[in-house]
Image (cartoon, rainbow, N blue to C red):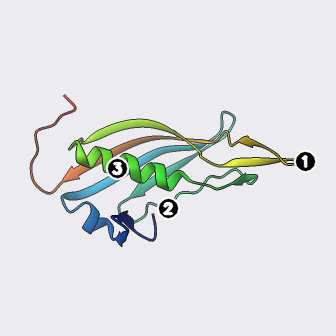
Amino acid sequence: MADGYFFRGKSVSFEEAFPDIKELNIEGTEGDVAQHKKIFLNKDNLAISCSNPLCEDKVYNIKLGDLIAEMYRNKETLRKEIISCGGYENMGQGQKRRCLNHLNVKLEIKYKSPLIDKNG
């Protein structure tokens, strides 16, 4: 997501993609069942990679961007999600397994104009 968001083939900034978002805060943990690290992200810093050193294709950012876009479309202000890493680990001899790391996040969006809260 550091390079922008893609809409109809054109890369755009966060502000162009989500003009009504005043503030975005994401907090939670990243890791596997045995170890977690705390994360704090916002609209100016959305870069997060899988911390598993064996992981290839560390793709949290695409899934996180899709989640923000869905919340924006639905004008949601709060959501809690668990996002699995889309990467894989090489197991040798041409075999791979899915990376077991995940993000457990709480996303909060504040909009520039007042909205009716669809969360309750």
Q: Position of residue 63 (x, y in %)?
A: 47, 49
Direction from residue 56 to residue 12 in the image, left or right: left
**Identity, as a three-letter code, of the amino acid under mark 3:** Ile
Instruction: Residue 47: give its label.
Output: 2
Amino acid type of disc 1?
A: Gln
The residue depicted at 41 percent of the width and 54 percent of the height is: 65
Quadrant (top left, top right, bottom left, bottom right) of the N terminus: bottom left
- Which quadrant of the figure has residue 106? top left
Nearer the camera: disc 3 or disc 2: 3
For residue 93, the mark is 1
Residue tagged by mark 3?
Answer: 68
Residue positioned most to the top: 120
How far, Cα to Cα, is label 1 from label 2? 32 Å
Which amino acid lies under the numbered mark 2 shown in the image of this protein? Ala
Q: Alpha-carbon neighbours of circle 1 within 10 Å: few (<14), some, or many (≥20)?
A: few
> Distance from label 3 to label 1 (Cα)?
38 Å
Residue 71, percent across and down? Answer: 29, 44
Q: What x and y, as percent, mark residue 79? A: 34, 37
